[in-house]
Amino acid sequence: MISHRTVRASLIRAARLCLCAGLVLGVGTTGRPAAAQEAASAVQDVVLVDVALPLGDTVFKAARITVSGTRLSRDDLTAILKADSPEPWAPRLARLEAASISIPVLVSEHPGPGGSLQTVTYREVAARDVRAGRIAELTMAGAGVSVTGAHPGSGTYGRIVASDLDLAALVRLSSESGDGKGPVQRIYAAIQASDVTYTEASGVTIRIAGLEGRDFGGRQVPGGWNGAMAGLARGLEAVDPEMTAAERGKLAGTATDLADAVAFGSLELRGLAISRTGAGEPMLVEVGRLAHGGTGAESGTTLEAIAFAQGGLKARLARVALTGVSLAPTIATLRRLANPDTAVTDEELRRLTPAVGGLALQDLSLDMPGAPAPVGKEPGRTASRPPATAKSGDPLATPAAPGAAPVHLALRSGALTFGPLRDGVPTASRLDLSGLTFPAAMVAGMPVLGALPDYGYADLDLNLVVDSAWDEAKREVAVREMTLSGRDIGSLRLAGTIGGLGPELFASHIPAASLLMLTATAKALDLTIQNTGLFERFLAAQAKALSLKPEELRQEYVAATQFGVPAMLGNSPAARAIGAALGQFVTKPGRLTMTAKAKNAAGLGFADFGLARTPGAVLDKLDVDAKVE
């Protein structure tokens, strides 16, 4: 498997490249001089040669720039683009005006951490309708990327188009320092890029067929965006569990500044693919569409047509969506951690969790290699003949294990919703899985479910619902529903209330959490069992094992439940009610419902169960009802 560090580093570099298309490319247009002065002379065309623009750590170079339809003179343009001018870039760029600006080749060089150098060469750069430093439309035929240093690589861009690009805002955000509290400045209204490819020397390749973004901008941060991103990259490269409090605080502060400063309307990627070849097992991840955007409850991320392959493992997912995403808890925690005096506790790390309203997925398919056949058991195999191998030409193929049938798992739909966070933990949640199918042999040996293969089930089709919520005022957790059901099996549904659970429930340290065992109380429990085939299969299997007819064994079970169960439970009225209901269920399996509620409003605590000498002593403290439908 590819390491998390390698994937993280690859995605960080990919993000820099994508940002380069939207930000650095725009900065590069500052080398396309054209501005207006109301009192200037007639419209003219101006050609500039050998232009070099140092903007922070990045240097832009152009052998030739043609500014058409401008009232600015050559001296005016030279003053605007002067590298050592005492006037800031933003007001100078705001004077640019021209009908069009064209640059055949524009080169940018940006040094990175560890002595690395990123060079981007843009081709056929054209800006149309430049007014007061704003470009109505910016196009580029393509670009080539080269990175040297510790993580070398190369890549290309296809056609790039941006609209309503504000050069002054771009320069202010990228290179001018701010406090992160100013107004949001929009850089562009829309951007499109196609055919993006980047390959690292390690063998990791990232491809994006198309990229679209809208309304990208943000606030000025300390050190500017370029400085903050460079500092964050250096910090992540040198991350160390033993880093000093000051170093940790600086890294957290930089991450906070950037996370809170960036703003955009939407972002969509199409045809995303990440592959790895060379050393290690080949890997391929594909995403047909990735979209992020929205605000409030509608904000979130959607991925469609997802595929993963590595060795014999293959997975497909039609759609997965995160909704109601908010980084507010993460940003607030990072701000606290930016203070070197703040202790890094488990609670603080949990509070880094972003708020998520829900997660939904559709049509998950997973194929895994099965257990290989024992050595020497393959039919026709001789000691001198090597095992079968996969066909050549497939970069993701692995040698075929003899007799290893793939194991198939599937999920029709799944949903997970969350309530408000408490110390990084949701106070309410609901899990809903529908159509979870897999071979019954996978649960062999497990409690309860492990017996299903013996009852004739080859494949299982299950549904699962778990719904719970914590009430701080009542200091209780309501298990509103916990249901497991299966096709041709039946269903088991539980619901109940557990009291005595205060904020300690969310404590990460063991002493506080362990006290819950002493303070928690059981207040109510509802149990519903619905039979749709399992009991008949169970009865037939047991009857066969005991050499009895199923009806004979049924009568024995009826007697055992009607008389044996009450005796075991103390022969109280509640025990007899339970036994009678179980006897009716065995006679005609349908739906069995049992409810139990503590007579004491506070519920039954650990002592009530632990010190009870008999089950009947516990039942005496409950109101019990049992019935069969």
Image (cartoon, grey):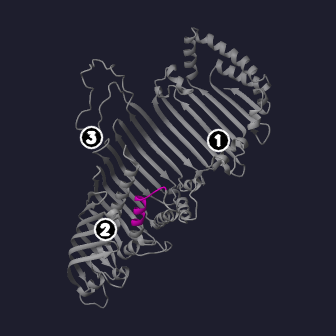
x%, y% of residue 371?
A: 39, 27
Q: In which quarter of the image is residue 374?
A: top left
Q: Distance between the residues labelled 3 and 1?
A: 48 Å
Query: Please, is residue 263 above or below residue 375 in the view?
Result: below
Q: Is the magenta stretch mostly helix, strand or loop?
A: helix
**Mark earlier in primary sequence (3, 1):** 3
- Residue labelled with disc 2: 110
Query: Please, is residue 78 above or below residue 359 in the view?
Result: below
**Mark earlier in primary sequence (2, 3):** 2
Q: How far apart are marks 2 and 1 (CA)?
A: 56 Å
Q: Distance between the residues labelled 2 and 3?
A: 35 Å
x%, y% of residue 466?
A: 58, 40
Q: Is mark 1 on a helix, strand or loop?
A: strand
- Residue labelled with disc 1: 479
Which is in the foreground here, disc 2 or disc 1?
2
Residue 474 in sight from this viewpoint: yes
Q: Given the image, on which type of amino acid does mark 1 rest?
A: Val
Left or right of 226 in this view: 336: right
Tell me the residue at 36%/38% (across/down).
314
| Viewport quadrant of the N terminus | top left
- Residue labelled with disc 3: 395
x%, y% of residue 557?
A: 66, 16
Q: What element carries label 3?
A: loop
Which is in the foreground here, disc 2 or disc 3?
2
Residue 61 falls inside the magenta stretch: no
